[in-house]
Image: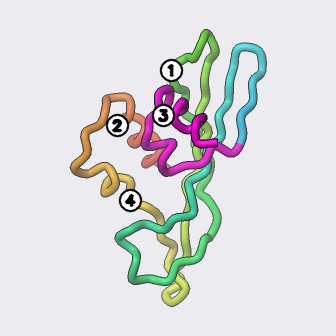
Amino acid sequence: MENYLDLLKLILPEFLINHFELVKNTRNGEVMHLYFEEQNTPPKEETTRILIAHGFHKEVTIQDFPLRGNTVYLHVKRRRWLDRTSKEVVQRDWNLVAQGTRMTTEFAAFLKEISRY
């Protein structure tokens, strides 16, 4: 079912599709809600640690551009991991992920919004 991912990359930030899974979508009248959860792939900079999935941060809701006359809300849940040895909570540093990449203004605003939490 790879075709729907290619379509979503045209509509939503490709970064969102590459690092998060669409787990649910609802539509109520002219309002659409898309729910995303960060994939369970630990940060690359933490490869020396033994990390186990440790739930999610509080969900962040972001209003996106309208699609076909529908108001769109993105509900994003960022993942966290627990270092098995030190018991330290680890999360992906989105500033590192975006470093050295070219991004649109809307994508930069998206990253800024999810980094607030």
Residue 27 falls inside the magenta stretch: no
Looking at numbered disc 4 in the image, what kind of residue is underneath it? Asp
Q: Are marks 1 and 2 in contact (CB under 8 Å)?
A: no
The residue that disc 3 covers is: 9
Relative to 95, is 58 on the left or the right? right
Q: Position of residue 101 (x, y in %)?
A: 25, 45
The residue that disc 1 covers is: 65
Mark 2 or mark 3: name the one nearer the start of the chain.
3
Q: Quadrant of the N terminus?
A: top right
Residue 8 falls inside the magenta stretch: yes
Residue 32 vertical position relative to residue 9 in the rendered view, above or below: above
The residue that disc 4 covers is: 93
Mark 4 or mark 1: name the one nearer the start of the chain.
1
Q: Nearer the viewer, residue 93 or 3?
A: 3
Residue 45 vertical position relative to residue 85 in the rendered view, above or below: above
Residue 5 vertical position relative to residue 18 in the rendered view, above or below: above
Q: Which residues are magenta?
A: 1-23
The crowding category of the residue bearing disc 4, from other C-alpha atoms within 10 Å (few below 14, some 14 to 19, many at least 20), is few
Q: Position of residue 91 (x, y in %)?
A: 47, 64
The residue that disc 2 covers is: 108
Mark 1 or mark 2: name the one nearer the start of the chain.
1
Question: Cα distance, mark 3 to mark 1?
Answer: 14 Å
